[in-house]
Amino acid sequence: MKLSKVILTGAVGLVSLSLAACGGGSSGDSSDGSGKGSSGQTVFKLAFNQTADHPQYEAGVALGKKLEEVTDGRYSVKVYPNEQLGGQADVIQNLSNGTVELMWVGAPVLEGFNSDFIVFNLPYMFDSTEAQGAVLSNTEALESLYHSIEDSKGITVLTGVNAGTRNIYNSKHPVVTPADLQGMKIRVQQSDSQVAMIEAMGAIASPMNQGDVYSALQTGVLDGAENNEVTWDALKQDEVAKYYSYTKHLMLPDYLLMSTKALNKMSEEDQAALLGLIPEIQQIANEGFAAFTQSSIEHATSIGAEFNDNVDIEAFKTLTQPLVDSALSGNDTRQALYQVVQEANAAYPAK
Ligand code: GCU
């Protein structure tokens, strides 16, 4: 289990950590690992790698409340923020073996389980937030992808949500052209596609868990990272890497995942009740994200961060296009998903 010094400080964090570690995080949790408390309620643990201000935290809490209502109290959810249950790459293994029931995950982490998830993680894939939203609401087109790792990994994808546009930030200077990234060590999420992307853009890739990024930036192990404004500001990385440049290279979804074992343990009626809540949870996360982005920009500005909108995006697109071509070539499943993206891009072009 990884602890971020930045986000998990003080007694409160440590108390919840030890409760999480012994499976006693809420009144409904069991001490025998069954997830059932004395009240007979099953409380699903939802692992989250960011703060309790984040809309995905709120969406998780809302899921718990609504689930309690629609199952007459048989099920609820407790959200563990700040990597209390571990970094994403580790906690997904626990989801796979059923000891954690729910988690929010950055899309690239799923590529290790089914490489076809790569399509939405390719540089410059979506032309607008609305286009991405249209794809992530197209449940028919996504159905087989979302169920593709149930048999092999015991993981069901419940939904995907917008997690902003990702841009490069660093402690040195604004990035205008790929030459500005030469020699810089930039953190990426743990997947081959993310490593290849940042290297094509001209930097040196350093894959790591989110909870380790702040101190790596602070100590100079990293020169920078790439993320949306929300994560950069909420995790205080703007204090140690203040130059934020709008390379707009990615619009990665986050997915809400569930342990297939936990889902299958529910009665058919309760499963249907849970799945019926998902569109609403998706909407709560999406709407909250747009508002949180604005307040993150304002806060970052107030502490002296510098935004740079003068980026040679065409140069970065040209450098990364071969990655898109090679990921899509000769693979019918990916081509079909790409077609869905293309249609959404045509319907909702960049503004
Ligand atoms: C974003 C995304 C997370 C992801 C994180 C990261 O914040 O919403 O799911 O884990 O980036 O880069 O690790």
Image (tube, rainbow, N blue to C red):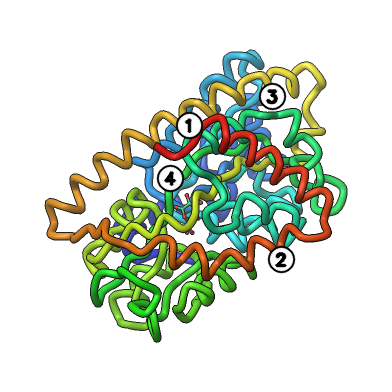
**Which label's residue is closer to the chain start, 1 or 2?**
1
Residue sitting at x 69%, y 59%: 111
- For residue 213, what is the image quadrant? bottom left
Q: Position of residue 143 (x, y in %)?
A: 77, 34
For the residue pair 256 and 25, the one nearer the viewer reads as: 256
Reading the image, the residue beneath label 1 is: 59
Quarter of the image that includes the N terminus: bottom right
**Which label's residue is closer to the chain start, 3 or 2?**
3
- Give the CA separation, mark 4 to mark 1: 16 Å
Name the amino acid type tagged 3: Leu
Residue sitting at x 53%, y 50%: 252
Q: Nearer the viewer, mark 1 or mark 2?
A: 2
- Give the CA separation, mark 1 to mark 2: 36 Å
Name the amino acid type tagged 2: Ser
- The disc placed on residue 275 is 3
Note whether 15 is above or below 216 in the view shown: above
- Give the CA separation, mark 3 to mark 4: 25 Å
Does the beta carbon of the residue at mark 4 sit less than 8 Å from ligand 1?
yes
Q: In this rendering, would 238 be left or right of 322?
A: left
Query: How dense is the environment of label 1, judged by Cα within 10 Å: few (below 14), some, or many (20 and up)?
Result: many
Reading the image, the residue beneath label 2 is: 326
- The disc placed on residue 164 is 4
